[in-house]
Every structure is written in structure tokens, then in C-alpha cells.
Image: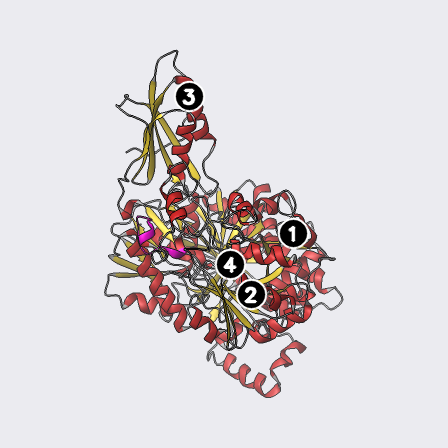
Amino acid sequence: MAPLQPDRGPMPPPASGERAQRWHIRGRVQGVGFRPYVYRLAHAHGLAGWVRNEGATIVVHAQGAPPALFAFGTALHAGGPPAARVLGIRGEAAARERLGGFEIRASRVTAAQGHLPVDLFACDECLAEMRDPASRRHRYPFINCTQCGPRYTLMDALPYDRSRTTMRGFALCGDCAAEFADPLDRRFHAQPLACARCGPTLRWQDGATGIAGCEAALAAAIAALQCGRVIAMRGVGGYHLLCDATQPAAIEQLRRRKRRPFKPLALVVPWRGADGLAYADRLAHLLPAHRAALRDPARPLVLARCREDAPVGQGIAPGLDEIALMLPYSPLLHLLVDTLGVALVATSGNRSGEPVFTEPDEAEEGLRDIADGFLHHDRDIARPAEDPLVRLVAGAIRPVRLGRGNAPLEMRLPRPVAAPTLAVGAFGKNTVALAWGDRAVISPHIGEMGSPRSQQVLAQVCSDLQHLYGVPAQRVVHDAHPGFPNSVWAQRLGLPSAAIWHHHAHAAALAGEIGGNEPLLCFTWDGNGLGPDRSLWGGEALLGGPGAWQRVASFRRFRLPGGEKSILQPWRSAISLCWETGRQWSGGAVAGPAALHTLRVAWDSRINAPTTTAIGRLFDAAAALLDLCATASVEGEAPMRLEAAAARAGLPERALALPMARDAQGIWRADWEPLVGELLDRETAPAVRAAAFHARLAQTLCDQALLLRSECGVARVGLCGGVFQNALLAQRAQDLLEEAGFAVHLPRLLPVNDAAVSYGQLVEAATHAC
């Protein structure tokens, strides 16, 4: 079948007589109740015909009176179920068939042709039913229909049928079975269908005390939260740690127990007002883009600027101006926040950097020193999925983390892979991806690869993707760093394997998303990644396209004393810049004179002091030199504090670029040395110095692009790598580049950080250049 293109709308009705028409609909149209929706729509218009899955599309055949057929086609073009994403409709005239009515026909689809449905938020109809005392599902925390409920986290296999989900052990009662079998009911073939008589239930565990039953367990959890206690709740994709966000003592207790002194805490807020955002409006300054993102079907966490008088504890995001908010997406979360009437902290129920716990026993073991009680349920979770996170960056809402509701994410490859290929991603912010033909499926966020549990979940998700789609990988690609656990694991699979350079994967991910054959100048700025010269890159400009990247610009190198320790100890990057430039910095005393002397000897001798060009480490150094963050509790703390300080001052309208010169390899290198003196200038307020730092880096990027355009005529510029999560830097860089006449691209579908690396590895692999 030729690629589908959106048509110009429904065909106008013929003059007279019964007619037939057929539509081919592509997009996210499986697992979202699209076929029952079409059935009910056809029934309402009195049409005969059928609907079925065919490969990656839904095909609809309808026939009847021209006005009814026209109205039906208009409705198809107007949309579909709330969770559906129609990407294209092609309509065509069809021959009439002998039909007695409208029916849903058996699918003509193999696993490899199907699409994994994502987990869906609780729809308005189910919520109204849950709140109705006359309903038999009144206050039932697992209510769902074809429009809502879990999908990816409970599937064992495709096609998506109840027998292939973790709901197979719950036999439908008579009432639920009748709904499931009725094509006119909104629960027709709703695979997670259940009620209090036949479905999952809650259980509260508080030490040796266990309370079974939804209402009793829910009441115990609510009482614990009201008393300022921390609870662990089993959700859709894993456990959350919850506490009352209006009680500072509860927040401090959670931070102390989880050893999370700084990292911002996410909030789930009550649904209030006509649009659900009245309570959220009390917490943050919501722009239209934030409002739309909060109500998106993925129900992501949305970063927005916090109000000074927000009715939550100051410990939610210490030192920052933004907080992460989300609306409740599951019936259980709605019941909790509706009853309490306040925002709840809802942070991941995990050990730092690892995937969330999914099983009650492992959660009680792993979280026993954090949670005062556990709200369990008995609907098994097939695989973890954390909450997605988005941020407004450079004029658009962009993902920071893929998760429940927006992943697995399916994308096209600009060139098909020669054989089914598995990509195992980067070390941090890991995702994995599977490709066959020109299709690529990217997993939800898995986590850092430094723990056995993270590596175990990575192996599970790799296996699940191949099993669910029925596509066994014949090749594996991985990061070129030989020490990454996922790279080592990939090489032990016994499949042909290939290493992909980290920053080539970043650039290829953006190139694959935006398409086009013209050369792309891609600035790949991040914290570190091994480059082809075996040094640590992170401030590069790559020119070309997938499989043919050329490094054309970078920054002056500097050494990282202590190597990987610098990630959580920004003072190491700061003191290295001072040593490199012969400057003194009193902040270096954080290590003590003796330890500092030993470190200097090692640095001078190039012992455990790898060379880097990483802009991420420059941000670390700047935060330390400004006394904003010398030692971090989590990766990224220093750059976040630096950005927050700069935002308070506001970027200067103009800034000078850093000096640049060509090296022996012909690479334009910017020299960061002037930044060191400016950052150490105690006569200027720290926030103003932080703002100037951002502005000079953005101007330097633009000047590098201008130099390269004068040499090779490149017109397209891409920005990728974790540094461009920084909204101030990304916006200023985009503005300068656009003023200079460049077409500027940042990713919209994938995160700009290392979560995109798995997809980029596939794009590179498809070029056969690796």
C-alpha cells in the first residue's frame, strides 16, 4: 500500500442513491477504542459496513444514503477517541457489498505490523461514573473503558487481548461480561475491564498490620498522608512515594530518608475548575503551552515557574524557580487528591537512578527505610514506566523524559535498517530501541546503568520489545564507550554488533526526527561522551548527516581531576579551569589542603585526569565558581542552579563571543579562558555573572555557525545534547541563529538528552557506515 496522505476531507455527497466509501486511517489508532468508536458512529448514522485492523492502519468501509455517508466521513475527519492520534486519512470510492449491518471484523495484522498502545489517563466519563454514588463502580480505583486505562504496562503479547495481559487472572462478572460483549457500550472489548466484584483490589500494609479491601485500604492511606507520613503507592507503571506537599515536615522527612537533599520533587495536584487547572494555577504561572501540556493525554509532569505564594512547602524545589506539576491520571490518584484536597508529592519509588519498583515484595524491601506504609494492589505490572516529563524550551513543549503515556514511542527511520536491529542506548537517562524496516520503537525511560537492577530492567525491556512485536533482533548497536554496562551486555548477546560514537548518535537522532537531505550543522553539547579521538567530547559541532559526520568546531580542552568524580563534584571542574589559566580560587579548599595537593600532583601528571571539551562540565565549573554548587547531590544540580540564577537576572541583550582559532586539524576551537576571569569577578552579582555566562556561550555558538556557513554554505543548524535542556541557553541560541538567517531545529518528539541516543544509534546503523 502506498504511504497514506491526509486527503482534502470527506467526499461531497452524490446526487442520489446509496453509495459506498472506504477510508484508510493511520496513526495511534490501536488500543485506544478506535474500532468501537467507528462502530458506534456508523450505527448512529444508520450505515452498513465494517471496520478492521490491517497492518499499521485501520480500514473502514461504509455504505448508505449519501447525506449520512457524508456526515459519517466528516466525523471521521474531525477526530476519534481522546487518546487516538490520527496522522493521515485517505478516502476513496468503493464498490457496494452485500451487508446486513455494520460489524467489527477480525484483524489482518501480525505482531510486527501492530503498534504497542500506551497507558491512557482516566477519561471524563469514567471519572464521573466513579464519583456517582448510584454507580456500581462508585469509588472503584481501577475503573476504565476503551478510552482509558493501562495498556503497555500490563501487556504480555500482541494482539492486545485480555488473555495476553496481566488481567487474564480476573474473570469478568456477568455485568462486566455483558458490557465487554456489547458493541454499543463504551466498554466493548476494553481489555482491562473490571469492577469491585471481579477486578483488582487494594491492600494497605503498615508494619505487621494489613488491611484488605479498596475502601478500607484507601482510608488508611489517606489517614497516613493527613498525619504527615510518607507512603509508597503502587500505581500504573510502578511505585510512587507520596506525602502531603503542604506539610514542610513531611517533605523534609521524605528528603532525609531518600537521601535526596536537592533534587526537585514532583507534585500531583487536584483537578479543580472547568479545565481542571484551578489548583495548578495557585502553584505556578501557567502559560497557554503549559496548560495544554498538563491536559495532554499523556498527563505528563510539566515544569513551570513557581508562584512565590504557592501553598506548598518551600522544600519542593530548593534554589529553583520551577516546579513539576501533573494532573492525576489514574482513578486511584484522583481518589487520593480529591479526598485530601491538596497537592501531593509524587516522586519515584526507587533507589536513586534505578527504575521504579513494580512488585510489592521488592518495594517493601527496597523502600522500608523511606515509607511508613504501603498501598498495594494486585493488578500485576508487566514492566516499569515512570511518569513522563516535559518543559517549555525555545518556544515549544519538549520532552525531558519518556514514560507512561507517551512511550513506547514509534518513529520512522530516514533509511531502513538492513536487518532487525536492537539499540541499547547510553549510560545515563537510558532508553532502548528496536528497528525493523523503517520502523523504530523507543522504550520509556529506564534509568542509569550503574546498578544491577537497571541492567536487569534493560535486558527485560529489550526482550519484551522483541517478543511483543515478534521481531527478533539480528544485530545490536551500542555506545562506543567500552566500559558502559549496556555496551558490554550487548556484545555478549552473540549477535553481530557495532559501536556508535556518542555524539554521532545525538546528531543522528535529531537528523532522523527532522528529516531532509540537506547538510545539517549539529551542535552536540552535553556532559561527556567518548569521541573518536578517545577524549571526552561534549562541546562539538558536527557537519553532515547520518553516517557521515565531520567534527568542525569545538572548545578548548581541559582536564577533569578525578575523572568521573567531577560529575557530582563541580568544584573539580572549577579548579581545573583555574589551574589551566594560572588563577587562584578559594573555593578549591572544599577538598582540604592535603587532598588538593595530591589532586594537583595527579592532574599535573595526567593521572586519572581525562581531557574533555564538555560544555556540561563548564556549567558545573561556573556554578562552583559562583558559589552556587560546589558539591552536587545529583547529576545536573549545578547547571540547574546556574540557570535559575541567570533567569533571575535576565540575559544581557548583547554579549561577545569567546575568541576562536583553528587548530592543526582545521577545527574551530572556542577558548573558554575569558569566562574564568568574569566568573571570579566579585564586584559583579553572581546572578549577573551567571546570565553573562549563558549569553557568551550562545553568542559563541552563533559565531561558530557563521564561520562555518561562510566556508561551506550550511543553512540548517541543530541543537542537541543535554545542555540544551537549559531553556535560557536554547532560547538565546535559537534567537541569534534565526536572526542570522539559519533554519534552527531542536527535537520535539525525543528528549534532547541521552534518552535520544538509542534512536540515533539506529539511524546511524541504517547508513551501513558503522
Q: Tell me whether the residue at label 1 lies in contact with that at label 4, contact meaning CB atoms closer than 8 angstroms.
A: no
The residue carrying mark 2 is: 636
The kind of residue tagged 1 is: Ala
Q: Tell me whether the residue at label 4 lies in contact with that at label 2, contact meaning CB atoms closer than 8 angstroms.
A: yes
Badge 2 or badge 3: first in the primary sequence? 3
Residue 145, given in percent of the width and then of the height, sits at: 44, 46
Badge 4 or badge 3: first in the primary sequence? 3
The residue carrying mark 1 is: 280
Left or right position of 263 against 602: right
Badge 1 or badge 4: first in the primary sequence? 1
Task: Tell which tag, 2 or 1, sits nearer the viewer.
Answer: 1
Badge 1 or badge 3: first in the primary sequence? 3
The kind of residue tagged 3 is: Ala
Q: Residues within 10 Å of mark 2 (few under 14, many from 20)?
A: many
Q: CA distance from mark 2 to mark 3?
A: 58 Å
The residue carrying mark 4 is: 722
Mark 2 falls on what kind of element? loop
In the picture shown, does residue 664 fall above or below 115?
below
Badge 2 or badge 1: first in the primary sequence? 1
Mark 1 falls on what kind of element? helix
Q: Residues within 10 Å of mark 1 (few under 14, many from 20)?
A: many
Task: Tell which tag, 1 or 3, sits nearer the viewer.
Answer: 3
